[in-house]
Amino acid sequence: MRPGRAPALMRMPRGGHRSEGDRPLRLVILASFRRLGEALFAFAGGRRVALTMTLMLLGAILEGVGLAMLVPLVAVLADAEGRASGTIASLLAQVGISSPFGQLAGLLGFFVVIILLRAIVLMARERALARLQIEFIEHERLCIITAVARADWSQLSGLRHARVVNALTVNIQRVGGTVQLLMQIVVSLLMFAAQLIVVLALVPGVGIAILVFTLIGAARLWFGIQRGLRQGVKIGRAQLGLTETTERLLNGLKVATAENAQMAFVQVLADTSTEMSAGQIAYQRELSRFRATVSAGIGLAGAAMLLVGFWTQGGTPTLLAALLIISRMAGPALGIYQNVEVFATLLPAHTEIRQLEQELRTMQVRAHDGAVDLRGTVRLDKATYLHADGGGIHDVTLTIEPGEIVAITGASGSGKTTLIDLLASLLCPQSGSMHVNDLPLDGALAPCWREHIAYVGQDAFLMNDTIRTNLTWGCRLQDDASLWRALEQVEIAQTVRAMPMGLDTMLNEHGARLSGGERQRIALARALMRRPFMLILDEASNAIDIETENKIMMRLAAVRPRPIILIVAHRTETLRACTRQISVMGGRVIEDRVRLPDGLCCQPIRVKEV
Ligand SMILES: Nc1ncnc2c1ncn2[C@@H]1O[C@H](COP(=O)(O)OP(=O)(O)OP(=O)(O)O)[C@@H](O)[C@H]1O
């Protein structure tokens, strides 16, 4: 994957109110919000959403009922004779509880029941929300990685690598935060609504005043949301840069260390990081000013409402209860304010993930279903594949029969890898065609063909896992006997046997505990474990000494049934076992001749079959 243009949302003008495609910011916000809602709904399904919403509503209703209970309780406590009044008091009197203590105990008992019920509902609600959030994130992560795995290689290789890494690490965490905040906001809104309803019922004047303040606050909040979204886009852009720089640093660390030039990398990282931190500090400063204004506003509004309540109701128990409730409302109100803006800063992460998924979806190839035999002659007819810079392969026609060992030679940049990628159907001819066993290898058949291929490149891809796992991933064979046989074929069995944990020895990052030649031999052994019909060796043994390479090539040549073996190598010794040589120059096949396998035997070797 290579650097490319920033994704659409990331291209939003830095400080402007309009997004890419000249869409007003308000539409971008609404669209992002809708996308998140749709994704959550599509993941959870109607029933689960309904259940979660019911739990949220139930929690709010119980909150309201608990608060409403404060009125008779305050009345009992405030009454000189300790008597309750109202509906609950008359209910209690009907069941024979009329003494002040009995009424207080009865009210408290009811209150406790409500509190217990509320606690149970809130617990169920928290669990449901946490599960929904965690599972949604896992689902999103799997969607991306599956889309990457199913994407057509020629298109995928043009995708910016850091975008995928960023999506799977930073952005997915930010989406987790978005979902969590969204749920907290909905819960706070419902709680606030329940509290407001109780206040409206108890002291309508105060309730209306709160409603007016809330509406003014909501209008003010809209600016916070816009500011949050802009900040979120900036953070996303900076984080992508940070991921890219970190990747570059880690990939080039060895060279940089060898040249004592690590600080050049550190400087690039520091510049990106400083820019990001400066933006965040400025934003936090703005946010803290906003928060201070909001909390002062809530305090002032509370005091004003106290006065309104006092003038309209005097010091009645109802007013006292209303005051208690209003004091409880400040928390959710401030929470909504803070969470909504932070939510807006996180929202672009989901949009970026969605855009990435959509791009990946356009790259998907639908695999042919049903069995199809592709073990046969491989044929290219006037095949052309040109990369964006014009380099590649022009008008190539060739036929490769099963069991042939083909050397593909040519100068650097002549088109050898492009030719190999076409034969492996990693690339599809832009013109001309490819047939295997007389079947045209279209997009749907290509994945089936690749099941018969083993590919070893010069980088010898190894995972940070055991030798066993490295040998068996993607292979049907898994048994120890096959593993050892493959290791013997590539002259590494003895080295692995000498390791303390044998096949279960950990290889560390990219097989760091092995030499370059050992890594290549493990990669070759894995290729043999696949029992391929076509084995591609693209500079796959250039780190192995010539004598050992000779032995390995002999063994590969003796495998029965022998796969087609395509060898790209610059070392002539590597090509000794080849039965045919195709020379490429400027993207064209300039020579295709039979080659007599020459004196492989520097020393006689007993050939074993895989
Ligand atoms: N992904 C790509 N995007 C753009 N151009 C590419 C890409 N891959 C290869 N090319 C171009 O296509 C031409 C052939 O490249 P290719 O990798 O096939 O050559 P090669 O013979 O394998 O080279 P080498 O021996 O150096 O690996 C080169 O000019 C190269 O610049």
Image: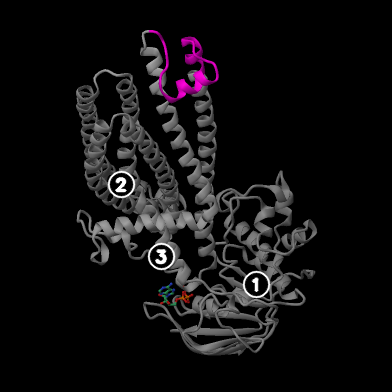
Q: Where are the magenta residues, as a range? A: 81-106
**Disc 2 residue type (three-letter):** Gln
Quarter of the displayed picture in which ligand 1 can be seen: bottom left
Q: Is residue 104 magenta?
A: yes
Q: Residue 451, labelled with which disc? A: 1
- 587 or 258, nearer to the observer: 587
* Residue with the mark numbered 3: 2
Quarter holding the C terminus is: bottom right
Residue at 56% over, 53% down: 510
Q: Position of residue 523 (x, y in %)?
A: 63, 62
Which badge, 1 or 2, is on the more N-terminal residue? 2
Per the model, the C-alpha gap separating discs 1 and 2 is 45 Å
> In the displayed structure, does residue 167 sit left or right of residue 24?
right
Percent position of residue 116, x then y: 53, 27
Q: Main secondary structure of the magenta part?
A: helix
Residue 339 in which image quadrant? top left
| Mark 3 residue type | Arg
Q: Which residue is mark 2?
A: 267
On the question of residue 151 being in view, the answer is yes
Residues at marks 1 and 2 touching, judged by CB atoms closer than 8 Å:
no
Q: Is residue 210 magenta?
A: no
Q: Nearer the viewer, residue 163 or 70?
A: 70
Residue plotted at (50% across, 31% down): 118
- 1 vs 2, front mark: 1
Tell me if mark 2 has few (under 14), some (14-19) or many (20+) residues whose alpha carbon lies within 10 angstroms of its own: few
Looking at the picture, how far across and down is residue 503, in whole percent? Answer: 72, 51
